[in-house]
Amino acid sequence: AQSVTQLDSHVSVSEGTPVLLRCNYSSSYSPSLFWYVQHPNKGLQLLLKYTSAATLVKGINGFEAEFKKSETSFHLTKPSAHMSDAAEYFCVVSFGYSSASKIIFGSGTRLSIRP
Amino acid sequence: SAVISQKPSRDICQRGTSLTIQCQVDSQVTMMFWYRQQPGQSLTLIATANQGSEATYESGFVIDKFPISRPNLTFSTLTVSNMSPEDSSIYLCSVTLGGEQFFGPGTRLTVL
């Protein structure tokens, strides 16, 4: 069965320190993996995506994620947190490339930034 | 890419009434997906709408409560029927195109 697990419901870091948001997936197939961000009262915004090309994926706003097949992980990182990074982050898994592909959302991680 | 619009963007409804949410995509797609995001929660898939056939509902969601129409390859509607305060959520439609997921801006529903 396909699933996605975000290991932390809430992460709090100080401004200027590194960010790590963890995501593990379970799949019988080669998945596509995504990170989305949702700021309060805003729509979902795609941060980055992995679709079987380079395992280290760079996204917007300085975020990046590394696909590790051996660990079935796709953790999101950023070297230096900014106050504007405070938001909800969702790890998302998609199985297939056709328009019939279904996606599964992780439970979300709320990122707080301390001044 | 795909651009998705939804109407209405938000609404406040009375208990026992129904609301129909429209979703329009600027590309032809085989399937459209409807999600619900309850306050403070992640997104949960309600159903998958395939043009020309009945929608497929996920566990916990039924057609009588969430009827869906899919008249063509660029449009779908989701109706929230006989609403209760527990239906207060953001409802989003989504499509998959070229291996990427695109989401509408969502419809914020409040049921009093």
Image (cartoon, grey):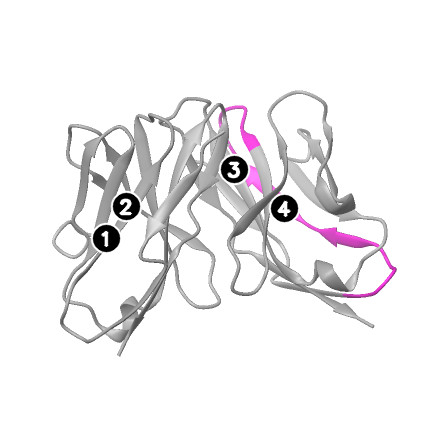
Residue B58's label in the rendered image is: 2
Give the CA separation, mark 3 to mark 1: 21 Å
Q: Secondary structure at mark 1?
A: loop
Q: Crowding at label 3, few (<14), some or many (≥20) Cα neighbours within 10 Å?
A: many
Membership of B78 in magenta stretch = no
- Relative to B33, say whether A67 is above or below: above
Residue B60 picture location, percent across and down = 25, 54
**Callout 4 amino acid:** Cys
Residue A74 picture location, percent across and down = 66, 39
Q: Crowding at label 4, few (<14), some or many (≥20) Cα neighbours within 10 Å?
A: many
- Marks 3 & 4 on one chain: yes
**Callout 3 amino acid:** Val
**Range of magenta residues:** A13-32
Give the CA separation, mark 3 to mark 2: 17 Å
Residue B74 placement: quadrant: top left
Q: Crowding at label 2, few (<14), some or many (≥20) Cα neighbours within 10 Å?
A: few
Q: Secondary structure at mark 2?
A: loop
Who's the residue at 38% across and 32% down the image?
B26
Q: Crowding at label 1, few (<14), some or many (≥20) Cα neighbours within 10 Å?
A: some
- Assess whether mark 1 and mark 4 are in contact (beta carbons under 8 angstroms): no
Who's the residue at 16% across and 61% down the image?
B81
| Residue at image mark 4 | A23
Give the CA separation, mark 1 to mark 2: 6 Å
Give the letter of the chain under mark 4.
A
| Residue at image mark 3 | A93
Residue B61's label in the rendered image is: 1
Give the letter of the chain under mark 1.
B
